[in-house]
Amino acid sequence: MATKAKKTTKKKTVKAKKVSKPAVKKIKISSLAKELNLDPKDLLVMLKDLGVEAKTAASSIDTETAKIVKEVSAPKKEAKPAVKEVTPPPAPKPQPPVPSEPVPEVKANGPVIETEDISVKELSEKLVVRASDLIKELMKRGTLANINQRINAEMAKDIAGALGRQVTIKKRDTVVAQSPDVLVGKLIHRPPVVTIMGHVDHGKTKLLDAIRKTRVAEGEAGGITQHIGAYQVEVHGKKVTFLDTPGHEAFTALRARGAKVTDIAVLVVAADDGVKPQTIEAIDHAKAAGVPIMVAINKIDKPGVDLDRVKTQLSKQDLLAEDWGGTTVMVPTSAKDGTGIKELLEMILLIAEVQELKADPNGTPVGVVIESRLDKGRGPVADLLVKSGTLRVGDIFVLGATYGKVKALFDDHGKRLNEAGPATPVEVLGSNDVPTSGDMLQVMPSEREARMLAEQRKELKDKVSRGKVLSLEDFSKLVKEGKNKSLNLVVKADAQGSIEAIEQSLQNLAIGNIRINIIHRAVGPVNESDIMLARASAAIIVGFNVGFEGNAEAASAKECIEVREYDIIYKLVDDVKLAMEGLLEPVYEEVVLGHAEVRNLFKFSKVGVIAGCFVIDGKMVRGAKIRIFRDSEKIYEGKLESLKRFKDDVKAVEQNFECGIALQGFVNFKEGDVVEAFEIREKARRK
């Protein structure tokens, strides 16, 4: 019985292995060429024309592409079904008795594309044609697309025409959100927005509780903050707005959002516990957002606490206390007995005063969603922080991809308001849907414009969510366009020694003006907090001998964040180095492709003069730049417009072959002239 059981397990494993193989179905170019009775070289040329990348006969392509290539390259037998399929449109022939007006009606009632792009599947359904026919047409135009890929509306219309169908493109009216009006002369001081950050159970909520003299912590499960709350308190006749961000790891994503709207970050560190992993995360989030940090060293009422130990730990995170010659304000506090609370508030006001925080209360109202939810009795509710202007009941607004009219405003005590000025936290009712945290609110002139702008944003949001992952290659393009000069990295590794080795190796890389900015480094697997920090900072995550924790992998796919995993340090460094070399502004060089000698001249009435040439070295390439030399003197420079081999137009002619060259605007060829073909290429960089 035992042996039978063993045999069964073996069979099962074999089956499991067999199942995993079909995931990568590929066919070699040589095998496909044999199947199609073609020379592999001819097939490679055909694939290149169709936009399929394949270098040699040993290269492979997936079976789906091979199937389409078979259909495209098949003899005319394949064309007949297509003709039969196209014949139904002329069915309206029995309708000639009707005047010529029905023709435009048919066009108008045909499929309508209202979006900027459409998937191949959607287009095939609209046109009632096979998706494979659409894919073939795309391939003829040099675009290799699968059934779920999206193509722009103009291309969709062009392809529909090629298949005997008609499509109407109906573009929506676009609404542009106007920049908020700000009158510099009417700017007034506004309350500072302060975010409380730190490790779980270091007393953040109790500290805020002591500040506003209410008991929040006891009312929440386990004394841990369950959502972002915004509260306003009065200190010496001046208002201060506090954001209470959760410290538990499950809510680290909200911390990044909290840092977006903040003016000052108060880092709470327990005097008895010191700097913890989440404390470092909080510091990195605040630094990434460019927010000034002040520290509240809490729980000083506990016996045997050592403030110098905490300050030493913080100094390792580049936060050096003022009394140690640094610039970071550190205030010892005790939320339990109220020690240091007054001093903390005074320091907040002092830092705010230095920042000179101002806003225009009469400008266009703009706000940021801190948190949102669906209330059974009241509908969509947005916890909003007004950034500028004054939001009033009755205002029509657009909020991210939603819109609405302000039905009611409530302050942090639940009191109904008629209006809310800059840096005021309010609950807003009246949105047609639940907005997303971080969405911007802007007041609009009419409900129609608000609705149209919300629809445009929703479409754009969907488009972005379908977009590519931010990768090293994408970043290279951004730098070439002059949009960025630093590469942001989040580094996760299996041990502290590995992090130090990676950091040291990356710091040694100095290529041009490109900088590496490691915004967060830590031991352990990639978690959701890393994903949210990378998203907020447009960073790439590199992991060394680590995997994912919890839902981090799903979050990275959802947020379009690239996580690169390595098990050898030099490979990690090499990849970053190669990326940085790609990030540098390109240096171009001239590369000579070949030379040809003019041996005969042929005159044609339509074309003009065609120079019969013999390729001496290299090759002649259609579309390349050329120079013509006569007795070693340059007489012409231009572009090789037409290249022929006998009567056929060709892309290139190799050495020791004859060819015909025709140029637009130049007919003064003479036998013995030398044609030099060249191109401008990006110079490969070597260190």
Image: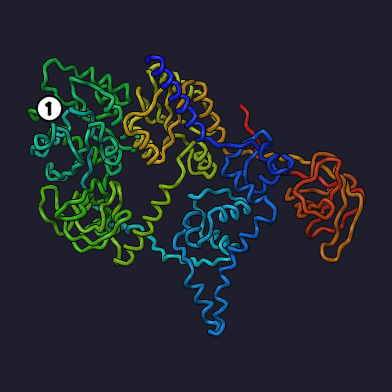
Q: Nearer the viewer, residue 155 or 687?
A: 155
Residue 531: image quadrant is: top left
Front-most of residues 312 and 399: 399
Q: Amino acid at mark 1?
A: Ser
In which quadrant of the rendered image does the C terminus lie?
top right
- The residue drawn where x is 42% and y is 36% is 539
Please say if 42 is above or below 342: below
- On the question of residue 680 being in view, the answer is no
Task: Please report the residue visible at 30 percent of the width from the left and 52 percent of the height from the top.
Answer: 440
Position of the N terminus by quadrant: top left
State the image coordinates of residue 231 (x, y, percent, origin top left).
16, 44
Q: Is residue 608 left or right of residue 55?
A: right
Q: Does residue 34 appear to the left or right of 376 in the view shown?
A: right
Counting from the top left corner in percent of width and height, residue 129 is at: 53, 59
Q: Choose top left, top right, bottom left or bottom right for residue 178.
A: bottom left
* Residue 59 can be seen, yes or no: yes
Tell me the quarter of the picture where residue 394 sits. bottom left
Residue, disc 1: 334
Q: Nearer the viewer, residue 675 or 207?
A: 675
Q: Name the residue at the front extreme.
A: 1
Above or below, 8 against 59 in this view is above
